[in-house]
Amino acid sequence: MINPILKNTAYLTVSRMLNRVLFAFVAIAISRKLGVEGLGIYGFVFAFVTLIFLFIGIGDSVAIREIIKDKKRSGEYAWNLFFLKVLFVGFAFLILNLAAKFYPMAQEVKHLVYICGFVFVLGSFANFPSILFTSHQKFKFYAISDIIKDCATVSLSLLFIFFGKGLLWVLYAYLIGYLAEGFYGFSIFFKYFWKFKAYKIKLFLWARWLKQGVYFSLQQGLVLMLYQLNLLIIPFFIGFYYVGVYSAPAKIMVGVFFMYSSFQTAVYPYYSSFTEKNRLKKLHNIHNRYSFILAVITSFAFILLSKPLILTIYGAKFSESVFVLQIMSLGMPFAFVNRNNSTFLNAIKKEQINFYFTAISCLVSVLLSILLVVPYGVNGVAFAGIMSSLVYAVISQLYIQKFNRILQTYPNDR
């Protein structure tokens, strides 16, 4: 069991490390060519659109779990999930149009928001084959499709920036990258996972996935909100310049966390397939122990190397970001454990509990960010992130310990 996990983790880790390295070059190019404010606008646009498109994946996780248990119906499930996604993507784009009209932003920024919306629409469909790749544990295809998209997007972005183009052309590069990913992903999808066959639209499947998946998707959405909302709070109170100051270290932290999450993606199908309760408990305990040790070591490394890291990557203009990175690094152990606990809760069908815990931590983050952003600037926002992570770590760990004590009263499933 562990060997497939390690193999799939290796595929995803390579692709995600490459993703972070490649897109770091895009962030560096934008920061050096367009300055701190340019990087701030770039971060704001993606944050604004991400918040609108957070919940278009409702049903994905439940469908993956059901395909794992009944692969013979993968074509039927994929067919229904695709049209459910069409419905949600269309609804999200309508909401984006309304939000862009009412949020105070310059016309140039609003134009970027609309183009970024098309990027998310195309990306949601280009990523669709990855649902089958995940449910069949074929992470090699998942990784290759990501690498194709990343290489196309980043190479074109750097080319456009080199020739003096602005953020609009960077978004065009994203569109081309997703087209490349979709072409590869669907070619593999139809070759190995889905015969050319139309299935009936089954509304009861939609209802079941929505009912079971709504809390999972809301929880995942709130996790993204913890970062994206800050990119909206900061310019509202203190301007786009400080979005850039905050985004520079945040992108480094997101990159580290993104690479770590590749292990979670690989582990989730195995968590979901375990029927022996004590094996599930043991895997989670081992997972948490070594993740925490890794996070503490990584945290100290980033605290010590924060200044040369920021100045080397972004330049002297981002010197204010050094202390922000040090603050963010302190929260890394909580973030790693939180990711583990979240995966465990979802796998044991406690999505609703997980959503409540995440909502509490998100509320803490937003309230503290609003209270601290004016007197303490982006340093206060970074501190708010640590406190929200600590809150989730405490309440989720207490719940899981209680759950594990209950498991001890049952005999193992053999």
Image: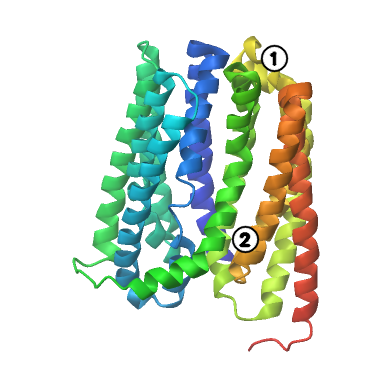
Residue 139 placement (x, y as % from top left):
44, 56
Identify residue type, mark 1: Ser
Dot 1, how many residues are within 10 Å of its Cα: few (below 14), some (14-19), or many (20+)?
Answer: some
Which residue is located at x 55 percent, y 15 percent?
A: 37
Residue 104 placement (x, y as % from top left):
50, 25
Tag 1 secondary structure:
loop
Which residue is located at x 34 percent, y 72 percent?
A: 203
Which residue is located at x 47 percent, y 29 percent?
A: 45
- Position above or below: 257 against 264: above
Which residue is located at x 64 percent, y 35 percent?
A: 253
Dot 2, how many residues are within 10 Å of its Cα: few (below 14), some (14-19), or many (20+)?
Answer: many
Q: Quadrant of the N terminus?
A: bottom right
Tag 2 secondary structure:
helix
Residue 319 shows which numbered tag?
Answer: 1
Do we see residue 22 in this rendering?
no
Q: Quadrant of the C terminus?
A: bottom right
- Left or right: residue 374 versus residue 29 is right
Q: Which is more toward the observer, 284 or 367?
A: 367
Residue 220 placement (x, y as % from top left):
56, 53
Residue 394 placement (x, y as % from top left):
80, 55
Residue 343 shows which numbered tag?
Answer: 2
- Position above or below: 120 against 268: above
Q: Are marks 1 and 2 in contact (CB under 8 Å)?
A: no
